[in-house]
């Protein structure tokens, strides 16, 4: 079965533009008694040109979801599309090319090459692909991220915040369809973290990028347009236009609920859409 990426999401009359889509996405690790169901039949649409945060308790499946959407790991069942391309079923070589050409990555640990300077790190993925960055765009990204006077510095000569800005520029330089950021502020002090979040926000608002960010930090999630909450491998809630306070309140309810045995947990833990709402497919209006 193949569903075009522009098809209306279940429950929605209007088609929404999606950058990535997953249906019945399932991932199990191991087998038999030790098997772990990391993702349990997840349906999700990532809206194009929006900033989506993914939150949830430790072990809820956030990284697994990101890895499967990015084609970094194989699914146990279900389908994933990047734009109109179904990536489930692609061969490893095709996936490598797709990741290189169409996806940008930012990690908590920056993942910069220590022997290369900032500019070389920024252009490395395109250099490897034998592509030339669009010069005007490159200059724009460098200026937007305030890296102009740091381009000749190696990572060790840069602060953590500057290193993450280099990683952000590296993710942006090929104008990927989707940027995945896994705890991008996890290793930064709060000021540098805020700066990086501001740049990601700008990347969405000014550069029309699509960003998906995994985070534990309600303050970081407050920079997004929509928070998806995962628990036990399922999307159990979503929050458009989040604030740090509203996210924190929602997370507290997880803590209380997850302290209860499974059979005592309240109904609200059913996935969005199960009770007739628009589920994780809804696209929030922006203020
Ligand atoms: N390679 C693996 N082998 C076995 N189990 C795994 C593997 N990767 C993840 N898991 C399990 O799958 C579940 C989901 O893990 P995942 O890393 O996606 O959660 P997470 O929400 O990102 O957690 P955290 O917030 O702690 O990073 C967990 O129970 C985890 O132990």
Image (cartoon, rainbow, N blue to C red):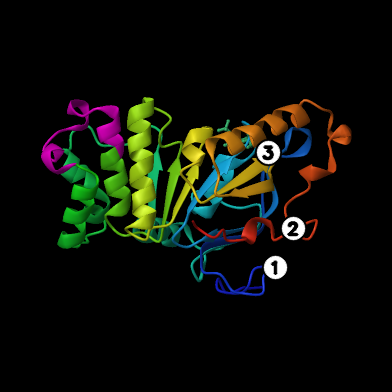
Ligand 1 quarter of the rendering = top right
Please report the residue visible at 39 percent of the width from the left and 55 percent of the height from the top: 204
Disc number for residue 273: 2
Mark 3: give few (<14), some (14-19) or many (20+) Cα within 10 Å: few
Is 133 rendered above or below residue 218? below
Query: In the shown orientation, is residue 51 left or right of residue 7?
Result: left
**Marks 1 & 2, CB-CB < 8 Å contact:** yes
Pick the residue in front: 5 or 237.
237
> Can you see residue 123?
no
N-term-proximal mark, 1 vs 2: 1
Query: In the shown orientation, is residue 158 left or right of residue 12?
Result: left
Please report the residue visible at 17 percent of the width from the left and 38 percent of the height from the top: 116
Assess mark 3: CB under 8 A from ligand 1? yes
**Marks 3 & 2, CB-CB < 8 Å contact:** no
Assess mark 2: CB under 8 A from ligand 1? no
Mark 2: give few (<14), some (14-19) or many (20+) Cα within 10 Å: some
> Can you see residue 162?
yes
Residue 229 location (% of width, % of height)? 63, 43
- Please state the extent of the stretch shown in magenta in the rendering: 147-164
Q: Name the residue under label 1.
A: 10
Query: In the shown orientation, is residue 34 left or right of residue 246?
Result: right
Q: Name the residue under label 3.
A: 30
The answer to if 129 sits in the magenta stretch is: no
Exactly how many numbered labels are in the figure? 3
Residue 262 location (% of width, % of height)? 84, 34
SS assignment at label 3: loop
């Amino acid at each position: 079965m193949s569903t075009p990426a522009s098809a209306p999401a279940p429950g929605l009359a209007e088609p929404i533009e999606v950058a990535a889509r997953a249906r019945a996405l399932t991932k199990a690790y191991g087998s038999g008694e030790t098997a772990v169901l990391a993702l349990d039949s997840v349906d999700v649409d990532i809206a194009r040109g929006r900033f989506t945060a993914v939150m949830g308790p430790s072990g809820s499946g956030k990284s697994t979801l990101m890895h499967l959407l990015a084609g970094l790991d194989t699914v146990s069942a279900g389908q994933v599309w990047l734009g109109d391309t179904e990536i489930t079923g692609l061969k490893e070589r095709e996936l490598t090319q797709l990741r290189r050409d169409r996806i940008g990555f930012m990690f908590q640990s920056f993942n910069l090459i220590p022997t290369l300077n900032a500019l070389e790190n920024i252009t490395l993925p395109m250099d490897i692909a034998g592509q030339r960055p669009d010069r005007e765009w490159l200059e724009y990204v460098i200026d937007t991220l305030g890296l102009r006077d740091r381009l000749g510095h190696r990572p060790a000569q840069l602060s953590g915040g500057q290193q993450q800005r280099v990683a952000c520029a590296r993710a942006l330089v090929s104008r990927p369809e989707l940027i995945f950021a896994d705890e991008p502020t996890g290793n930064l002090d709060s000021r540098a973290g805020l700066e990086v979040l501001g740049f990601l926000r700008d990347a969405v608002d000014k550069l029309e990028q699509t960003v998906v960010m995994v985070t534990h930090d309600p303050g970081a999630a407050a920079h997004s347009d929509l928070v998806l909450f995962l628990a036990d491998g399922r999307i159990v809630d979503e929050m458009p236009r989040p604030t740090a306070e509203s996210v924190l309140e929602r997370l507290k309810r997880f803590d209380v609920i997850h302290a209860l045995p499974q059979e005592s947990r309240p109904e609200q833990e059913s996935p969005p859409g199960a009770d007739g709402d628009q589920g994780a497919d809804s696209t929030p209006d922006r203020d």
